[in-house]
Amino acid sequence: MSATETKAAEGMTIDTLEVRRIMEMIPHRYPMLLVDRVINLRLGEGAIGIKNVSINEPFFQGHFPTEPVMPGVLIVESMAQTAGVVVVATMGADAEGKLVYFMSIDGARFRRPVVPGDRVEVHVQKLQSRQNVWKFSGKAIVDGNIAAEATFAAMIRGR
């Protein structure tokens, strides 16, 4: 998609992307795929990723077995994956399957634990983009309460 076509597409909304489509767009796979669905995707702007947290997640075996809590770094990773879907959807087929590398994570705050049974809504909003570098703000929300938030930048590039 050309820069002109990308600008024209920005703001268009995609209601729902299911997990099979997400896996076509980003290279992550179980157990590192941390987005089950993306809703309200606004091209060039942002989206909401959905992560349904299950006791069967492999990280709960060691973090912490008697008091299972989703690791904060994985919550931030779910933000990055949701943002990656926004980037690929905005850039089009040329970006599918490319890798997205963190460049920075700023202001990460963890407000409440994410535990088995939680449905995490991962809200990401583009702050800026220049060529292949994108900066987003993200919030992980459970039952209407912020569980975590961060600002992060990533670079998309071929394998």
Image: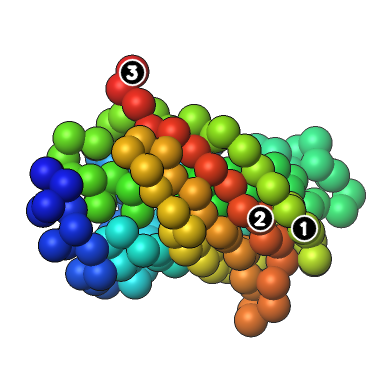
Q: Which mark is residue 159?
A: 3
- Please name the residue that numbered disc 1 is placed on: 109
Q: Please tell me which residue is depicted at 16% across the width and 40% down the height of the picture.
A: 93
In the rendered structure, the answer to whether residue 23 lies left or right of residue 3 reads: right
- Dividing the picture into quarters, in which one does residue 143 lie? bottom right
Q: Please tell me which residue is depicted at 32% across the width and 38% down the height of the picture.
A: 131
C-beta proximity under 8 Å, tags 1 and 2: yes
Q: CA distance from mark 3 to mark 1?
A: 31 Å
Which of disc 1 and disc 3 is earlier in sequence?
A: 1
Residue 18 visible in rendering: yes
Q: CA distance from mark 2 to mark 3?
A: 26 Å
- Please name the residue that numbered disc 2 is placed on: 150
x, y percent for residue 88: 28, 45
Q: Which mark is residue 23?
A: none
Coloring scheme used? rainbow
Judge the density around disc 1: few (<14), some (14-19), many (≥20) Cα neighbours within 10 Å: some
Q: CA distance from mark 1 to mark 2?
A: 6 Å
Type of residue at label 3? Arg
x, y percent for residue 54: 61, 55
> Could you tell me which quadrant the N terminus lies in?
top left
